[in-house]
């Protein structure tokens, strides 16, 4: 089910005027996913003749009106390039292995979370300790494994979600050029989807920058979702009773056309691409948790202070989003909801408090802490650790995990400085470091829903 909510700034949706911009139109279509009907609700936030490009332009104008946003000058851009050329040398692999080791992935945890989403007896093939760590009542836990940079495997409510999957050695439009990865990903796509038979239900794409949208990664994920599913009877961890066998790419407004052009497998078979504006939502039905309970997954596009650009002349021609993700038991009234927030990429802005008020409080949030120097140049688009702590508080997040650091040398701050400053900022704010601590690549964070 796909539902697009009215924007916060829109007139009330019960307006009697049939031509009011907030009117809602319903369209029904059948999806070939077994037993699923997709209901699409489209909210008009402008005159019917307004194009998608015009809608994005309005968001650009909105961002430009924020007091925290400004465009860097050409001189500042030149200084950035000059300073980047003199950036600190990346330590050797041996030094990095000592200071910032890659943690061996605990596949038993990942498989347990996946198995807990099935009523299949195959879940019993896993250790009871692994299952008990994630089982609860089936919608109690958000489990987040850091793959690197802004790429995460998030498991909640019987759903497996990848965020901004980037696995290549460089994030650049030019092969062999651009920022080089200095810490490898926690695992490969093949290891995740084939060797360990973890089916991906949803891929969130925040925007089109190369360190957040990688062509080869999304192409491989889409293809494998068509050619390899979790009904392989030779794998004892297989989820044979899992209903959700399709893959949904949820992308920022304007990016669906890129997927349709460049990633044919993204919209073939049971795969689909859904694009969202800020404050627009899509609801996916059919997650399965322990005991055979079903869950719905609501994903809402959130305003963030950033920009988009993939080619030479396409700046701000597609939108950029964070996402609020809520898993709800189909039989409850919201009391057992799990709430997760993925910010993608953003500078600090005053509107984050409104996000926390409208969509929070969040059980867990993924918040960027790196690529912030030189400060004057990067501040509108990237937060430093001090901003990130303030962001966490304004967002009303109970716990947070830092992203957008420790993988690519995008800017000039020392590589390990973000995690050091994060700890100090938490201390200075009087917060428990454990609620927003840097992970190692490959590490899994388990966040249980608060019952208070």
Image (cartoon, grey):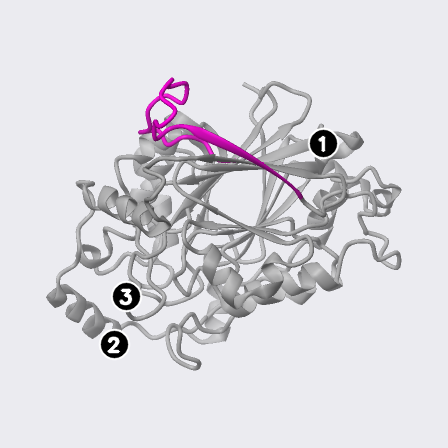
Q: Is residue 422 left or right of residue 139?
A: left
SS under mark 3: loop
Query: What residue is shown at x 27% (from left), y 44% (from top)?
Result: 58
Q: Residues within 10 Å of mark 1 (few under 14, many from 20)?
A: many
Per the model, the C-alpha gap separating discs 2 and 1 is: 53 Å
> Circle 2 sits in a helix, a strand or a loop, which is it?
helix
Label 1 and label 3: CA atoms lie apart by 47 Å
Q: Residue at x 68, y 59 (%)?
A: 225
Q: Is residue 173 left or right of residue 215?
A: left
**Farthest bottom residue?**
176
**Chain-order first, disc 2 or disc 1:** 2
The quadrant the C terminus occupies is: top right
Q: Which mark is residue 294?
A: 1
Spatial CA span between label 3 and label 2 = 9 Å
Q: Which residues make up the magenta segment?
A: 2-30
Residue 412 image label: 3
162 magenta-colored: no
Rendering coords of residue 117 (x, y %) = 74, 40
When the figure is inspected, residue 403 is found, relative to residue 134, above or below; the finding is: below
The spot of residue 10 in percent (x, y) is: 33, 28
Per the image, the residue denoted by label 2 is 85
User: Is residue 301 or residue 109 the one in the foreground?
Assistant: 301
Label 2 or label 1, whichever lies nearer to me, is: 1
Q: Is residue 188 visible?
A: no
Position above or below: 449 against 83: above
């Amino acid at each position: 089910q796909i539902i697009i909510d009215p924007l916060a700034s829109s007139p009330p949706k019960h307006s009697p005027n049939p031509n009011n911009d907030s009117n809602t139109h319903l369209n029904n279509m059948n999806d070939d996913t077994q037993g699923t009907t997709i209901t699409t609700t489209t909210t008009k936030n402008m005159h019917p003749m307004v194009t998608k490009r015009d809608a994005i332009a309005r968001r650009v104008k909105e961002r430009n009106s924020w007091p925290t946003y400004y465009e860097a000058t050409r001189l500042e851009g030149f200084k950035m390039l000059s300073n980047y050329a003199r950036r600190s040398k990346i330590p050797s692999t041996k030094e990095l292995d000592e200071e910032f080791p890659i943690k061996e992935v605990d596949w038993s945890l990942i498989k347990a979370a996946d198995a807990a989403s099935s009523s299949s007896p195959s879940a019993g093939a896993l250790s009871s300790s692994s299952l008990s760590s994630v089982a609860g009542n089936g919608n109690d836990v958000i489990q987040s494994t850091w793959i690197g940079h802004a790429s995460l495997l998030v498991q909640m409510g019987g759903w497996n979600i990848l965020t901004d999957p980037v696995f290549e050695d460089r994030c650049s439009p030019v092969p062999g050029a651009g920022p080089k990865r200095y810490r490898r990903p926690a695992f490969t796509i093949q290891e995740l989807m084939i060797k360990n038979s973890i089916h991906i239900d949803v891929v969130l794409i925040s925007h089109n920058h190369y360190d957040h949208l990688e062509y080869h990664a999304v192409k491989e994920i889409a293809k494998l979702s068509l050619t390899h599913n979790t009904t392989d009877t030779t794998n004892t961890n297989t989820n044979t009773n899992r209903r959700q066998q399709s893959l949904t790419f949820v992308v920022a407004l304007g990016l669906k056309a890129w997927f349709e052009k460049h990633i044919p497998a993204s919209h073939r078979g049971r795969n689909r691409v859904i694009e969202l504006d800020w404050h627009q939502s899509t609801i996916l039905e059919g997650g399965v948790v322990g005991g055979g309970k079903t869950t719905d997954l609501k994903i809402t596009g959130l305003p963030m202070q950033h920009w988009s650009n993939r080619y030479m002349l396409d700046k701000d021609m597609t939108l950029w989003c964070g996402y609020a993700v809520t898993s709800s038991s189909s039989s409850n009234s919201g009391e057992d909801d799990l709430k997760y927030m993925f910010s993608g990429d953003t500078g600090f802005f005053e509107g984050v408090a409104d996000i926390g008020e409208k969509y929070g409080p969040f059980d867990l949030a993924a918040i960027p802490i790196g690529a912030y120097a030189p400060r004057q140049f990067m501040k509108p688009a990237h937060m430093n650790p001090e901003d990130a702590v303030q962001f966490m508080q304004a967002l009303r997040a109970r716990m947070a995990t830092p992203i957008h650091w420790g993988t690519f040398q995008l800017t000039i701050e020392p590589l390990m400085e973000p995690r050091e400053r994060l700890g100090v900022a938490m201390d200075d704010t009087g917060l428990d470091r454990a609620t927003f601590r840097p992970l190692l690549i490959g590490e899994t964070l388990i966040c249980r829903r608060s019952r208070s």
